[in-house]
């Protein structure tokens, strides 16, 4: 998260830098739109609230450029990733006094788009509006995500009660090519899983617990979901990659349990990225022993355009005959597109991109449930795909090749 100084603000901080003993940032889906924001902090925070950073912080001299430059700075790096599932965001920042004084930040308008409440105490529960119908201008860094399999974007899975954080098991999933929610050429950087919102506990886990091994291996698949082999290696291509290995700790409350939104929980970053080259993919989980009980927590799974094989009691199993379905995943990825109008990420802006753009253009409203994730085609970032977006698309379409 980066800050933007007000126009009269000089570069900040001065030659001795600045620091605070603690700065905590919490992000959630907002309960209210900006126009009806409450003065009570808790009334604005959604059920998926996640503390993305906490602890001491420091800034080097000049970390925030002068307001006259219009450049963002004063970056606050997050320790945990928040998976954005659409809708309005609520960001709560609580901090101790900043040495050498904090900067004056630029306001953003109007209240229909952004608003902020502030108070003088770090532990305050309510405050007053910041400025006049405005909030502070910030810039959020993000990695795009999408749901795999696509068939589960707007519906529950067809195979519930699947446990992925229980110990001593191997679980391979295979997703068909038309179900992979990642553009061809993108680099997959991490994953989160969707909890079963019908049978899961209200809050999971109740306390931190650890698996002494949680290995994830991915590859291009050599089979389809319908022809998935019982032998794990027979489903894996030559690009098989261990994207993470070693122990994992599932922090308390990583999953909110039952909500109508079918929530995804803990984001698991990869230590080695996987480049998606197209076609079906596999994902193999190998779990070691657990320090707590997670076996009663169910995750959402499906056999629609996907399949799964599971071996219980052996993390090193080479095959499995159980068919529990594939866990519904949300992969984080770095898009390899060279220009915004290249909506299918093939280096060209052509009729295939036009078909994607037209679908968004016809729906119009980015908040419509039928709109594709990320609202492709909203080049003006005003939450609407209209004629203002059509002009930059046509310019790129006429050029064809991405620069």
Image: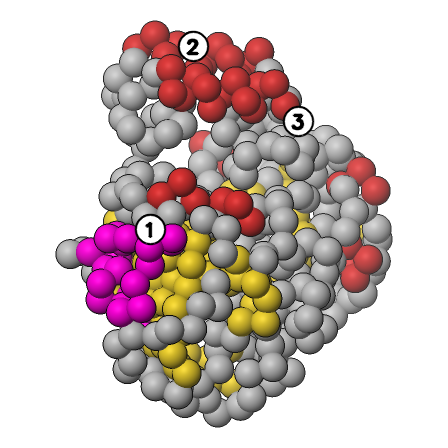
Q: What's the residue at 52%, 85% (across, down)?
A: 209
Q: Position of residue 143 (x, y in %)?
A: 43, 48
Quadrant showing the C terminus:
top left
Reading the image, the residue beneath label 3 is: 365
3 and 1 marks in contact (CB < 8 Å): no
Q: What's the residue at 48%, 32% (across, down)?
A: 70
Reading the image, the residue beneath label 1 is: 224
- In the depicted structure, whether residue 11 falls above or below residue 380: below
Tell me if mark 1 has few (under 14), some (14-19) or many (20+) residues whose alpha carbon lies within 10 angstroms of its own.
Answer: many
Q: Is residue 171 magenta?
A: no
Q: Which stretch is magenta? A: 213-237
Determine the secondary structure under disc 1. Answer: loop
Q: CA distance from mark 2 to mark 3?
A: 20 Å
- In the depicted structure, whether residue 203 falls above or below residue 113: below
1 and 2 marks in contact (CB < 8 Å): no
Determine the secondary structure under disc 3. Answer: loop
Which comes sooner in the sequence, label 3 or label 1?
A: 1
Residue 213 lies in what quarter of the image? bottom left
Reading the image, the residue beneath label 2 is: 394
Which comes sooner in the sequence, label 2 or label 3?
A: 3
Residue 236, numbered label: none
């Amino acid at each position: 998260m980066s800050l933007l100084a007000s126009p009269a603000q000089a570069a900040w901080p001065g030659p001795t830098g600045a620091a605070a003993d603690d700065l905590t940032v919490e992000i959630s889906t907002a309960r209210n739109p900006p126009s009806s924001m409450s003065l009570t902090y808790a009334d604005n925070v959604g059920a998926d609230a996640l503390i993305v950073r906490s602890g001491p912080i420091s800034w080097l001299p000049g970390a925030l450029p002068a307001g006259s430059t219009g450049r963002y700075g004063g970056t606050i790096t997050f320790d945990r990733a928040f998976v954005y599932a659409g809708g309005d965001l609520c960001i709560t920042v609580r901090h101790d006094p900043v040495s050498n004084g904090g900067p004056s930040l630029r306001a953003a308008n109007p209240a229909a788009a952004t608003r902020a409440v502030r108070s003088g105490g770090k532990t305050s529960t309510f405050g007053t509006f910041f400025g006049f119908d405005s909030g502070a201008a910030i810039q959020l860094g993000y990695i795009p995500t999408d749901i795999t399999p696509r068939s589960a974007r707007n519906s529950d899975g067809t195979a519930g009660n699947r446990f992925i954080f229980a110990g001593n098991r191997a679980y391979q999933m295979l997703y068909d090519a038309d179900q992979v929610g990642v553009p061809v050429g993108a680099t997959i950087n991490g994953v989160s899983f969707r909890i079963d919102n019908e049978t899961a506990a209200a809050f999971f886990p109740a306390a931190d617990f650890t698996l002494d091994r949680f290995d994830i291996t991915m590859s291009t698949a050599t089979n389809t979901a319908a022809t998935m082999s019982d032998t794990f290696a027979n489903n894996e291509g030559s690009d098989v990659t261990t994207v993470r290995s070693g122990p994992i700790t599932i922090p308390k409350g990583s999953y909110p349990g039952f909500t109508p939104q079918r929530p995804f929980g803990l984001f698991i970053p990869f230590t080695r990225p996987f480049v998606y080259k197209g076609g079906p993919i596999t994902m193999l989980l190998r779990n070691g022993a657990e320090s707590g009980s997670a076996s009663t927590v169910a995750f959402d799974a499906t056999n629609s355009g996907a399949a799964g094989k599971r071996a219980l009691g052996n993390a090193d199993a080479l095959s499995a005959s159980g068919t529990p379905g594939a866990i519904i995943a949300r992969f984080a990825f770095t898009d390899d597109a060279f220009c915004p109008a290249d909506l299918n990420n093939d280096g060209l802006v052509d009729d295939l991109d036009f078909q994607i753009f037209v679908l968004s253009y016809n729906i119009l409203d980015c908040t419509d449930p039928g709109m594709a994730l990320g609202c492709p085609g909203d080049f003006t970032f005003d939450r609407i795909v209209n004629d203002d977006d059509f002009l930059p698309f046509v310019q790129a379409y006429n050029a064809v090749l991405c620069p």
